[in-house]
Image (cartoon, rainbow, N blue to C red):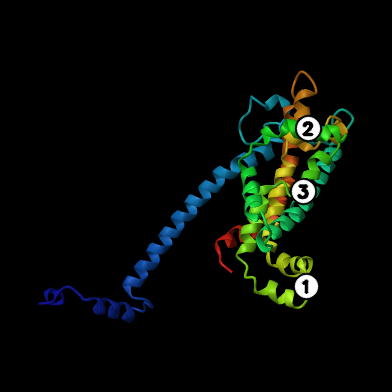
């Protein structure tokens, strides 16, 4: 005997009652909607809390730029007790007679040249490894991959001796020239994997029409690997902008210092460190990286996500 015979209403009866009372949806559907809404609210709250935790150091840094030196070490709170813009005035005036814009311009020059050199040289090297068959291809590619396992500190002294013999110390050449020689094996490997996923039919069709490797590379390959190129450009810009060891090793004149070295000067200029100026200069140096990442974030996601696709 069914449960409805013992006085328990069936699902059809409940739905009919809901419809008679003017409800557009049956009870089970409403329960599912309520449960889904509850889960969405919980996830939203959890993600909001995680976002606040991640962004709190950046927000604290922003408000700390308005704190006077006396509050550092005394007021760890988010908001300053006596807000001031003197830190920005001090930073813009520069240090040791060198204005802040000079350090900023040096970093920008190094970062832009690093992006151009890295993208161009890595794309050409990757095309050779991925689309051209020649003797020793496997050995050269394995050697290139092996450089990823080689720590940078191992080659510091040989590189310094090389550039010193070429009379390039205290110039931008040691920091820029290797970027144009495809020395970044990570980017070369990234582009090689991207190109190997692309079918060779277009290459063969272009070759039948009389196109050479330069035409195929520029007219066919480059437009198709645009997401990967932008990914390489983002990482190259950030790595060059934040590079501290390279400029510290090769640059000796304060006029040539980029922002990472200039930030250190705020703590070494006197016996007492100017924490307000240091924090403010750090925030100013961080802004271009944030803007660069926000603008090209979509291309970065596309370039990384498409690595798992097969053409």
Whichever of callouts 1 and 2 sits on the residue coming sooner in the sequence is: 2
Residue nearest the observer in this picture, 255 or 119:
119
- Give the alpha-carbon distance from disc 1 to disc 3, as whole Å: 26 Å
Q: Find numbered disc 2 in the image and state the secondary structure of the residue it sits on.
A: helix
Identified at 71% across, 32% down, the residue is 67
**Which residue matches tag 1?**
211
User: Is 269 placed left or right of 293 in the picture?
Assistant: right
Relative height, residue 280 to residue 55 (above, below)? above
Q: Residue furthest top?
A: 271
**Which residue matches tag 3?**
181
Relative height, residue 215 to residue 180 (above, below)? below
- Give the alpha-carbon distance from disc 1 to disc 2, as whole Å: 42 Å
Q: Position of residue 24 (x, y in %)?
A: 38, 78
Answer few, some or many: residues within 10 Å of disc 2's Cα (few below 14, many 20 plus, some between 14 and 19): some
Residue 13: name its quadrant: bottom left
User: Is 199 placed left or right of 214 in the picture?
Assistant: left
| Residue 160 marker | 2
């Amino acid at each position: 005997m069914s449960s409805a015979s013992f006085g328990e209403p069936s699902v059809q009866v409940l739905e009919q009652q809901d419809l008679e009372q003017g409800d557009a949806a049956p009870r089970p559907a409403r329960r599912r909607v309520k449960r889904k809404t509850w889960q969405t609210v919980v996830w939203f709250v959890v993600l909001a809390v995680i976002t606040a935790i991640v962004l709190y150091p950046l927000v604290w840094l922003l408000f700390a730029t308005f704190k006077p030196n006396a509050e550092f070490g005394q007021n760890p709170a988010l908001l300053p007790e006596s807000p001031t813009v003197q830190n920005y005035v001090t930073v813009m005036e520069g240090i040791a007679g060198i204005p802040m814009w000079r350090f900023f311009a040096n970093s920008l020059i190094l970062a832009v040249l690093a992006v151009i050199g890295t993208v161009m040289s890595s794309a050409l090297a990757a095309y050779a490894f991925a689309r051209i068959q020649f003797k020793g291809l496997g050995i050269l590619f394995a050697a290139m991959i092996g450089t990823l396992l080689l720590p940078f500190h191992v080659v510091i002294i040989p590189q310094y001796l090389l550039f010193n013999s070429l009379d390039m110390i205290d110039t931008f050449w040691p920091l820029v020239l290797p970027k144009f020689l495809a020395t970044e094996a990570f980017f070369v490997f990234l582009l090689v994997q991207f190109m190997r996923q692309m079918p060779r039919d277009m290459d063969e069709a272009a070759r039948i029409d009389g196109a050479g490797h330069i035409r195929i590379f520029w007219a066919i390959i480059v437009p198709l690997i645009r997401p990967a190129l932008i990914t390489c450009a983002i990482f190259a810009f950030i790595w060059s902008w934040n590079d501290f060891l390279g400029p510290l090793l090769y640059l000796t004149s304060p006029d040539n210092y980029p922002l990472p070295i200039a930030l250190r000067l705020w703590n070494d200029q006197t016996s007492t460190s100017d924490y307000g100026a240091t924090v403010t200069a750090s925030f100013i140096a961080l802004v271009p990286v944030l803007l660069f990442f926000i603008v090209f974030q979509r291309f970065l996601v596309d370039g990384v996500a498409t690595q798992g696709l097969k053409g």
